[in-house]
Image (cartoon, grey):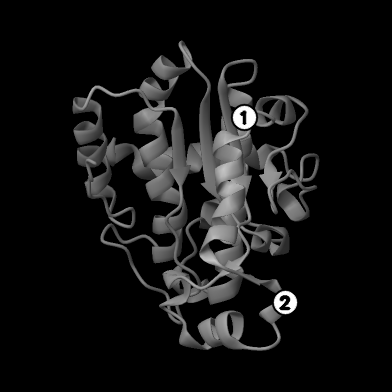
Amino acid sequence: ATILNVDLSDLTTVKPFVSSFLRLNLPLHVLVLNAGIMAPLQWEASKQGFESMFATNNLGHYLMTELLLPKLEETAQQAEVRIVILSSAAASMCSGLDVSKVPVPKDEYHEFADYCVTKAVDSFHARFLQQKYQGKKIYTTCVHPGIIKTGLLSHNPGYGGLFYDSWTFAPFRKGLASGAATTMYCALSPDIPSQVKDGWFFYYNRGPQASMGMSKPGVADDLVEKLAQRQHKLVAAYM
């Protein structure tokens, strides 16, 4: 196996990672955008000065995807391609966002509300890529994996205890294999192309689910393009 290092919270590491991958001269059939942090107690800056959740959950993924699109398009000339973005049911809790304040300013930060914003942005990213490649062999989905005890909440031990250890959330917790199952479904299931063509984009428990909140189609469709433009502007210096 070949392992390539990248830190998606640091945008300067993304292009070297992509360059190293491209030098392998391999096709790219599946891109899973899985990095994430949740709800740091205080506003934290990434190395480029962006709010850390947005830098990790959104900008790093956006930049990596943009740099890999030529390879994905090349692969799609011969075979199906899948892009799977780890979003969350938290996206449905985002009731509104101001694109000019993405990422959130330090004095307006709220750890859970702004986590929900990053997950909504992930959902809009999936919809943007679906629209971009409509009718082609590149299929994008976004996933709510469930509550899985990982390092996601390492920046917030209080939330970590609530989600990972309390009786309150015990019925909703999953093991690692079960938590990865929906991602694998979106990466490998032969049903994905027809489902995407039918308009599905949000997945949970190994199947498409009706999205809720502002990322639901028909609610704030203008944000599909606006958020893509905003992210592109923020990462342009690192492309």
The residue lying toward the viewer, choosing from 37 and 117, is: 37
Question: How far apart, in angstroms, are the residues tagged by discs 1 and 2?
Answer: 33 Å
Q: Give the labeled residue for mark 2.
A: 171
The image position of residue 53, as x and y in percent, is 44, 63
Amino acid type for the residue under numbered disc 2: Pro
* Foreground: disc 1 or disc 2: 2
Neighbours of disc 2 within 10 Å: few (<14), some (14-19), many (20+)? few
Which comes before the other along the chain, label 1 or label 2? 1
Q: Position of residue 122 (x, y in %)?
A: 56, 49
**Left of 136 or right of it: where is 211?**
right
Instruction: Return the residue found at the far top.
Output: 77
In the rendered image of this protein, does residue 136 appear above or below residue 223?
above
Residue 186: numbered disc: none
Q: Nearer the viewer, residue 239 or 5?
A: 5
Q: Is residue 118 visible?
A: no
- Horizontal placement of 44 versus 95: left or right? left
The quarter in which the C terminus is drawn is top left
Tell which of 110 and 148 is nearer to you. Answer: 148
On the image, the x and y values in percent for residue 51 come to 41, 64
Locate residue 55: give its quadrant: bottom left
Residue at x-position 33% and y-position 37%: 236
Give the residue displayed 64% in from the left and 28% down from the top: 190
Classify residue 123 as left or right of residue 31. Answer: right
Element assignment for label 1: helix
| C-beta proximity under 8 Å, tags 1 and 2 | no
The numbered mark at residue 130 is: 1
Q: Quadrant of residue 64?
A: top left
